[in-house]
Image (cartoon, helix red, strand yellow):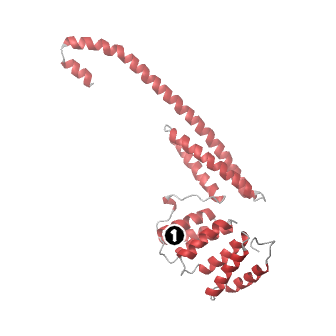
Amino acid sequence: MGMFRLLARSRPSLWLVALPLMLATAPGCISQMQADIAANQQRLDSLEEDLEAKRKELEEALAEASRVLRRNSADQGLQIEQIQTRLAMMEGQIAELRMESTGASQAQAQRSLELQRRLSEVARAAGMDIPLDTGEIPKSKSAHWEALTKAYRINKHSYARALGRAYVERYPKDDRADNAQYMIGSSYLKQGQAAAALGEFQKVLSTYRRGDAIDETLYDMAQAFLQVRSCNDAGTALKALLKNHKKSPLYGQAKKELRKVRELGPADCDDR
């Protein structure tokens, strides 16, 4: 409109000269704009088709993962590992397509969020450590602790670990922070991931030396060392428990366990 007003205020001869030029140029501009819009729409349609195909593939993988988790067969560990790899790859592909496909409808966006939620649930059930969104962490310390202990008690391992890490980060000086750190390691041990458990237990010993979770940590460390066939280290952990925690409820059990460890030989230990 600015150009038309400027020309309208100018001399009539200029207006008569400029008007045919603008009329001649306008169809070309409009045609180019239409071509650009058509090209963008075609690209968007292609992206949405790719995204829809990946969503269907992800739904099939989620269904397969659920069947494996329910079946609880002997080869479940290998199957879950393969599914974890597949889900992680597909999640990345879908994220890339979703970022490109800016013109997705509200319904499609909602489906993407639902698939993401299901992906996180299955991944956590399979033992993958999925970070929590801020909204998933209770705001009050008491509610956070309650959610953590409940998840640990009912063996929601990945969720318990995520809540435990968040608790230690938010309340590092709290009297129960050592217990939260212990539960992280214990959840790994329950899943048979002894090496990961040992790393988390070591944090209890180095950070919370005066906490009340030391005896449980030492006992479970011994169990983790046995799983990785390090019997001498298992014996060392049990001896530390017996020496420094004579009033522990685990004292008697630790004495029996130490006797068993001493009887183990090269068939059960790599360090003997």
Image quarter of the C terminus: bottom right
On screen, residue 101 versus residue 193, left or right, reads: left
Residue 176 location, x and y as percent?
Answer: 53, 76
The front one of 272 and 68 is 272
Residue 45 location, x and y as percent?
Answer: 55, 32
**Amino acid carrying mark 1 in the image:** Val
For the question of whether residue 10 can be seen, the reply is: yes
Q: Residue at x 21, y 18 (%)?
A: 8
Q: Is residue 231 above or below residue 69?
A: below
The front one of 269 and 123 is 269
Task: From the image, tell me which residue sits under label 1.
Answer: 168
- In terms of image quadrants, where is residue 149? bottom right
Residue 240 location, x and y as percent?
Answer: 64, 83
For the question of whether residue 152 can be seen, the reply is: no
Q: Is residue 222 above or below residue 169?
A: below
Q: Residues within 10 Å of mark 1 (few under 14, many from 20)?
A: some
> How many numbered markers are drawn?
1
Q: Residue at x 36, y 16 (%)?
A: 25
What element does badge 1 sit on? Answer: helix
Direction front: furthest residue? 272
Direction right: furthest residue? 267
Image quarter of the N terminus: top left
Q: Residue at x 67, y 85 (%)?
A: 251
- In terms of image quadrants, where is residue 216? bottom right
Residue 228 location, x and y as percent?
Answer: 72, 68
Direction bottom: furthest residue? 247
On screen, residue 264 versus residue 103, left or right, reads: right
Q: Residue at x 66, y 48 (%)?
A: 86
- In terms of image quadrants, where is residue 129? bottom right
